[in-house]
Structures are given as structure tokens and as C-alpha cells.
Image: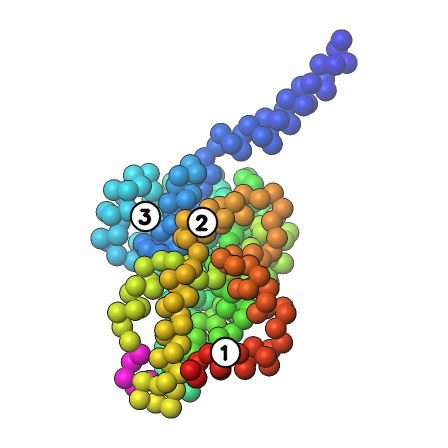
Amino acid sequence: MDWVKVPLVHLFAFILQTVLIPFTMTRSVLISGVSTGIGYHLLQAYYRRGYKVFGSIRRESDRERLLSEFPDFVPLLFDVTDESAIREGIEVVRRHLDGKGLDLLINNAGVAVSAPLMLIDTEDFHHQFDVNLYGVLRLTKACLPLLGAVENADHPPGRILNISSISGQVAYPYLGPYVSSKHALEGLSNSWRRELYPFGIDVIIIAPGSIRTPIWKKNSSSGVPDRFRNSIFGKYLENFRTITLNTGKRGMDPDEFANKVVAISEKKRPKTRYAIVKNYFSDWILVRYLVPARVLDWGIHRQLKK
């Protein structure tokens, strides 16, 4: 019966390496911008899933608040615009991992600058890119050795998820800086995926639509700035603000979104891009693929001039 024992030994080793070990080892994830909004819900979802969660925050007060809720969470105090602080944060991650690799990086931190392109200050446009694009570049570069972009890595390659937006492929007026940054982020993500292919590091784009987070309540308390309201765009901006707030209030539940992201990140063979919206046909397929660009131009204008 010796001829039976050899295959059984190999079968057991295969099961151990591919099934048992991955589910008994604690997986790790670093999420940028976890204090509130989408980032907070991602932190919550991965923490409940049993991950070792590292997350960036910008205020010391957020550290105590999050640790009281997630005792094993590791807060990293840095802004994605501060390269030196990022390096210090990643060194904390390295020490915690103690020779193991980082399984997952989620570039979530971002801001949204809203203004007519004709009137926006160049500094505001630059800040939009400094956070949403260059911030991703800085943090990803710092994490790549931990993700396996080194010669003869002694741990399995990690994976990168970049939080874009449906605005990464569909442009809306008065969000020009934000839309531009997300279009650029998607190009960066696709280039990076092909550059990191030799190391086995995958890069996946997550493109959410409206997510029902407190940011909508915050925005509803502030109107259109006077310098924009009194401009030739004033009427359109007031209507745009109303439409945007109503869309946000009807957005996807943030916990549902976070759970979808977790599921995507754990797929063996994920797609390169996922649009996560509440109504997949009307919120994505229709505006991205079925409605001609000129018709979409007219439809948006008609809504805003009411």
C-alpha cells in the first residue's frame, strides 16, 4: 500500500498550503484615511473579518476614539501629502509585521474640490491632485517592498486596491478637479498593475457611486460660496448642490459597500475594475456605455437649468 501513501502525503501538503494555512494566518491590510466615511467602514469590515488593520489618521484625537472601538487596530499618524510622515508610518507597519509581508494596501484617502473650472484657484486644483493622485503615489511607493516588489521576496505578493469613483470614467460639471484626479488615478492604477506584474502584485480599481456617509449632512449645512453664487454659474451651482445632496442621501449603505470591497479583495482572480453602485444599470451601465456623450451633455444641462 506504499503507493497510496505518497499521493496522500502530497494531497495533505497541498491542502495545508492552499486551504488551512491561509485561513489560520492573520492577514494584514493598510487603509489610508480611516477616521470617517468610507475609510472608517472599511476599517470596521476588515477588523471584523479578523485582519490586522493598519490605518492612517491625521488627528491624535482620532487615535483614542478608534482604539476604544477597535483595540487591536494600529493607527498611523500621517497625511498622504507628507512623505516623511508616511515613511515613519510604514516603519511602524514593518515592525508590527516582523518579517511578514503586507497582504493588502487600500488607497482610500481623498478630498473632493467642487468649483467651476473657470473660477477655481490653481492652488485648490493642485491640492486636489496632491491628495488624490500624488498621495496614492507616495503611499504606494513606500509600501511596495512590504507588498513584495523586491528581488527574491520571502513572502507571497500583496495586492493593491485604489478607491476611485464612477467619476473616474464619467465626468460631471463643477467637480472638474475631482473628476480629473480620479481619471488620472485610474490611468496610474492600470500602468502600475502592468509594471508590478512580474512581482505578482495585482492592482484593482474600486469605483463607488454615491455612498451614504455623514459627509452629505456636513455639506448640506454649507451653501454655495458667495464668490461662486454671484457668478454667471450661480443658478446652476445651486441646482447642482441640491441634486448632489439628494443623490448622496439615496446612496448605497456604507457597510454594504465595505463588505463588497472585502469580498473583492479576497477573490482569487478579481477583475481589474469594479463599479460599486446602488443601481448598476442606471447609475453605471446607462451613463457610461449606452447614452451617447452629446445626449448626456444635454441631459445634465437640462437638469441643472431648472
Distance from label 2 to label 1 (Cα)? 28 Å
Residue denoted by label 1:
300
Q: Main SS type for the magenta part?
A: helix
Q: Which residue lies furthest to the front in this view?
A: 306
Which label number is shown at residue 256? Answer: 2
Q: Where is residue 151 in the image (x, y as percent from the top left)?
A: 58, 47
Determine if the magenta segment contains residue 226: yes
Q: Which amino acid does label 1 sit on?
A: Ile
Q: Position of residue 155 (x, y in %)?
A: 54, 40
Distance from label 1 to label 3 (Cα)? 42 Å
Q: Give the range drawn in magenta.
A: 224-228
Q: Say left or right for 92 vs 25.
A: left
Q: Position of residue 173 (x, y in %)?
A: 46, 78
When the figure is inspected, residue 77 is found, relative to residue 166, above or below; the finding is above
Q: What residue type is labelled 2?
A: Glu
Give the structural element (helix, strand or loop) at label 2. helix
Distance from label 3 to label 2 (Cα)? 24 Å
Question: In this view of the protein, which residue sits in the foreground, 219 or 55?
Answer: 219
Chain-order first, disc 1 or disc 3: 3
Please report the residue visible at 54 percent of the width from the left and 29 percent of the height from the top. 21
Please report the residue visible at 64 percent of the width from the left and 52 percent of the height from the top. 198
Give the structural element (helix, strand or loop) at label 3. strand
Residue denoted by label 3:
75
Q: Nearer the viewer, mark 3 or mark 2?
A: 2
